[in-house]
Amino acid sequence: EAWNAIRAADGADLQKAASQAFRRDIEIHVRDISEKYLIQGETQDTAFMFVPSESVFAEIHENFEAIVHKAHRARVVIVSPSLLMLSIQVIQAILKDARMREQAHLIQGEVIRLMEDVARVDERVRKLQVHFGQSAKDIDDILVSTSKVTKRGQKIEALEFGAQPDGDAAVDAASRAPAAKVDTGARVADSKTGQLRLRVVEGDD
């Protein structure tokens, strides 16, 4: 209402009266916020006084600078819609930084344990690398051995053996061989009639 009265005032007297009423209303709001919402040991040290109009906020900072300074001394910050979220984010960042400073020793302990875990992982990776290197060497040795075995097999496969006489050829050779002289008293078996007959061949005198 006081703000509307300032805008509607036609004469200097009405303008002055409306400005005094506006200043008084703002001072009352600042005092109420400081007394009701700033409690030692329970709340933060600073409170926000939200002005829902950018034009009212601009009027306060332009023509009522004394009220702004008085609010600062009472630890009350006057904010507009465009400054409210920014002010809240600044306060949150300050509180977060304060909590981090309070827990700095805990954070340092966690960082130390994290570095120990990283060192263990690095050691195990190096051991695994050694095992992989040994496995690769064993595989190379196996490939060398299999290559040698393959080459020896190929050499054996390439060997040419001399021709061996078959069964008929052996019989042929035996039939062409000269007959041995039968000694006196040798017996010859003739099985033409299916009966065994013995003949004694007398040798020459």
Image (cartoon, grey):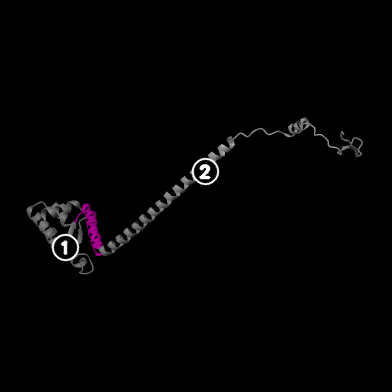
Outermost left residue: 12
Front in this rendered view, residue 205 or 24: 205
Q: Residue at x 17, y 51 (%)?
A: 55
- Quadrant holding the N terminus: bottom left
Q: Residue at x 17, y 59 (%)?
A: 77
Q: CA distance from mark 2 to mark 1?
A: 88 Å
Front in this rendered view, residue 133 or 21: 133
Q: Is 184 left, or right, of 26 in this rendering?
A: right
The quadrant where residue 187 appears: top right
Closer to us: mark 2 or mark 1?
2
Q: Amino acid at mark 1?
A: Arg
- State the SS at label 2: helix
Q: Quick check: 38 above or below 1?
A: below
Task: Name the chief secondary structure element in magenta.
Answer: helix
Q: Which mark is residue 75?
A: 1
Front in this rendered view, residue 99 or 46: 99
Q: Is 179 left, or right, of 77 in this rendering?
A: right
Membership of 88 in magenta stretch: yes
Outermost bottom residue: 41
Q: Which residues are magenta?
A: 79-102
- State the SS at label 1: loop
Q: Which mark is residue 96?
A: none
x, y percent for residue 39: 21, 68
First in sequence: mark 2 vs mark 1: 1
The quadrant where residue 76 appears: bottom left
Residue at label 2?
Answer: 146
Q: Quick check: 203 above or below 35?
A: above
Q: Amino acid at mark 2?
A: Thr
x, y percent for residue 118: 34, 57
Q: Are there few (<14), some (14-19), or many (20+) residues within 10 Å of tag 1?
A: some
Q: Is 42 left, or right, of 127 in this rendering?
A: left
